[in-house]
Image (cartoon, grey):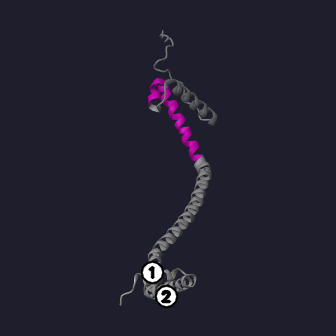
Amino acid sequence: MATSSKAAARRSLRPHTTPNVRENLRRERERVLARQAELESLAAPINDAAAKLAKLDAMLESRAATPQRKIEQLEKARDRRIAKIQQEYAAKIEAVRAEAASAGTHLTSEEQEQESVLLREYASAIVEFSENASPAELAPLLGVNTREAKEIIEQAKDCLDASGVAALPAAPAADDTRPVTAAS
């Protein structure tokens, strides 16, 4: 059925009246709320699946983080053990150093006696060598210069005199320039 343009114009004016605007707003609100409820019911499976996926992701992250935490715990335990061992060995090293320092400086009475005998033999050998050779010849043997060789000879003679061992009688040295008297 055909309507006149006046009737259409009247119908088009109808929604603009105050009671009609309120009714239209109420209906529109109901339509929006109904659409929202429909969308929520449609989205419920999506939200459930998303929640389950989030749980699964959290579980996987936890499972992946567990070895890393274990590694970190093992590394901390290793570091603690290393520190403990370092402290133990540092204490042991210090004890051995203290023992070495005290043991190395003290000779037993036998060792002291043996040392003094060896020193006298060494001094006697130096004096005997010096009686038959010059300090210049002794210096390379001892690895020192001639002046130090002369000092070592004098120290050896003093050591022998102090110990009561008689030094060998002085024989003329090869470079001695004393005048020789002729026998008549």
Local crowd size for mark 2, using a 10 Å CA cut-off: few (<14), some (14–19), many (≥20):
few
Q: Is residue 114 located in the magenta-colored stretch of the structure?
A: yes
- Is residue 134 among what the camera can see? no
Residue lying furthest bottom: 1
Type of amino acid at the residue the image marks with label 2: Ala
Whether residue 108 sits left or right of residue 183 in the image: it is right
- Image position, residue 82 (x, y; %): 53, 64
Please say if 7 is above or below 65.
below
Q: Decide which of tag 2 and tag 1 comes sooner along the chain.
A: 1
Quadrant into which the N terminus falls? bottom left
Q: Secondary structure at mark 2?
A: helix
Q: Main secondary structure of the magenta part?
A: helix
Type of amino acid at the residue the image marks with label 1: Ala
| Residue highlighted by disc 2 | 34
Whether residue 66 sits left or right of residue 100 in the image: it is left
- Image position, residue 66 (x, y; %): 47, 76
Q: How many numbered callouts?
A: 2
| Residue highlighted by disc 1 | 9
CB atoms of marks 2 and 1 within 8 Å: no
- Image position, residue 106 (x, y; %): 62, 50
Local crowd size for mark 1, using a 10 Å CA cut-off: few (<14), some (14–19), many (≥20):
few
Q: Nearer the viewer, residue 113 or 38?
A: 38
Residue at 50 percent of width and 30 percent of height:
128
Please say if 101 is above or below 162.
below
Q: Is residue 135 located in the magenta-colored stretch of the structure?
A: yes
Please say if 139 is above or below 176.
below
- Image position, residue 108 (x, y; %): 61, 52
Comparing marks 2 and 1, which lies closer to the viewer? 1
